[in-house]
Structures are given as C-alpha cells and as structure tokens.
C-alpha cells in the first residue's frame, strides 16, 4: 500500500489528516474551546467533539501516581500508562537512593519542591509507599490522596505491588 488512499475520485494523504488532528489537539490543550478551534481551522465543532471522544483515555479529574520502593516498577508504570495516569513517579530502592545521592542539598530541595508543585496540580494522587512516607506526602500535597501502604517505615528493600489491584484502584477512581 502506498502513501495515499483512493476513495472514489478523491486522493487522501493520511499524513495531512494526522497533522491536522495534532493541530486541533494542541490548540485544545492550550485551552481553546472546541468552537474557537473549529472557527480557527474551518471545521465543524462536532468533528472536534467526536475526535476527542475517539481518543479519550480517561474522563474526569487528573490523576498522578507516586510509588516507591517498587520491585516491579516497569509493570506498574505500564499499568498506569495504559489506564491514563498522567504523571507517574515510580522508583525502585536503588533509584530512590541514587536520586538523593546524585544531588546537592539545594538541588534535592528544589527538585522536591518542583515535584510537589507538579503533583498538587492533579486532582487525585495515588501514593504507594511506607506508612510514614505516605502520611508525609499526604501532608505535603494537601489534596485528594489515595494512600496505599506497602510496609512500615523505613523500607530498605523493594516491595512487589499487585498490578491488578492498581488497575482496579485506578478504574474505581476514574468511575
């Protein structure tokens, strides 16, 4: 199959469609209303609505995930991505210690403050960690936090997190 599609007497270039869709979504992501985008690009507002419905991963408030120290990090990150979690900070024990040791005190504080600011922008945050870390993050975020304790603090080894339980929790939050 070539680059183009013939439909009746029309020759269709899928890359032009893809570019236009990206433009529409970029404008919507910048805060323009469906009608404003439609007027600007010369398409029907209902087309933009249908386009968004086709690509919708999750409806409702924004969702973040913080989890550490996780033994099956890649699996948890994959579940979060598939279920539409917009921000995932998932580390195993080695990564979390490297994160602390690779930064000066000032860099660490700046990074943590920046991360707290990012996470506070989300409507709901799932926090998976030790009892003390979960409470600490709840206090810092001061928003809707779903705690999931995986042990008593301090945790010195990675802990397996059940990916199906996470999937169910995310779906319950979204519902």
Image (cartoon, rainbow, N blue to C red):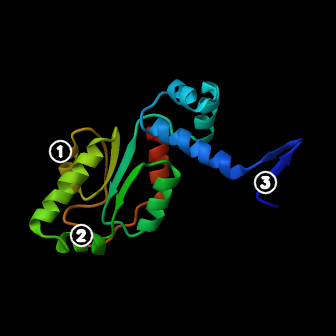
Relative to 167, residue 103 above or below: below
| Residue for badge 1 | 139
Quadrant of the frame with the N terminus: bottom right
Residue 63 or 153: which is nearer the viewer?
63
Q: Residue 97's quadrant in the figure? A: bottom left
Q: Is residue 145 left or right of residue 82?
A: left
* Residue nearest the observer in this picture, 129 or 55: 55
Which numbered dot is residue 4?
3
Q: How crowded is mark 2: few (under 14 residues within 10 Å), some or many (20 or more)?
A: few
Distance, label 1 to label 3, CA atoms, is: 55 Å
Evaluate whether residue 164 shows in this view: no
User: Residue placed at 35% from the left, 67% from the top?
Assistant: 159
Query: Residue at the left extreme?
Result: 105
* 149 or 141: nearer the viewer: 141
Tell me the crowding category of disc 3: few under 14, some 14 to 19, or many 20 or more residues within 10 angstroms, Cα based: few
Who comes first in sequence, dot 1 or dot 3? 3
Q: Nearer the viewer, mark 1 or mark 2?
A: 2
Q: Give how far apart the Cα atoms at labels 2 and 3 are.
A: 48 Å
- Which image quadrant is residue 154 in? bottom left
Mark 2 — residue?
Answer: 99
Q: Where is residue 156 in the image (x, y as percent from the top left)?
A: 24, 72
Mark positioned earlier in the residue sequence (2 or 3) = 3
Q: How crowded is mark 1: few (under 14 residues within 10 Å), some or many (20 or more)?
A: few
């Amino acid at each position: 199959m070539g680059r183009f599609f013939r439909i009746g007497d029309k020759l269709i270039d899928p890359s032009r469609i893809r570019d236009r869709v990206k433009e529409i979504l970029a404008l919507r992501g910048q805060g323009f209303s469906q009608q404003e985008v439609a007027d600007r690009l010369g398409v029907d507002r209902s087309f933009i609505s249908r386009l968004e419905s086709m690509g919708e991963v999750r409806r409702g408030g924004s969702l973040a995930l913080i989890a550490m120290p996780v033994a099956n990090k890649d699996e948890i990150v994959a579940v979060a991505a598939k279920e539409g979690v917009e921000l995932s900070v998932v580390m195993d024990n080695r990564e979390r210690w490297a994160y602390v040791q690779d930064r000066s005190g000032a860099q660490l504080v700046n990074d943590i403050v920046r991360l707290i600011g990012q996470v506070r922008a989300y409507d709901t945050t799932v926090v998976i960690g030790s009892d003390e870390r979960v409470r600490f993050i709840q206090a810092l975020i001061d928003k809707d936090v779903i705690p999931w304790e995986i042990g008593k603090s301090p945790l010195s080894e990675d802990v397996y997190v059940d990916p199906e339980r996470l999937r169910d929790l995310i779906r319950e939050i979204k519902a």
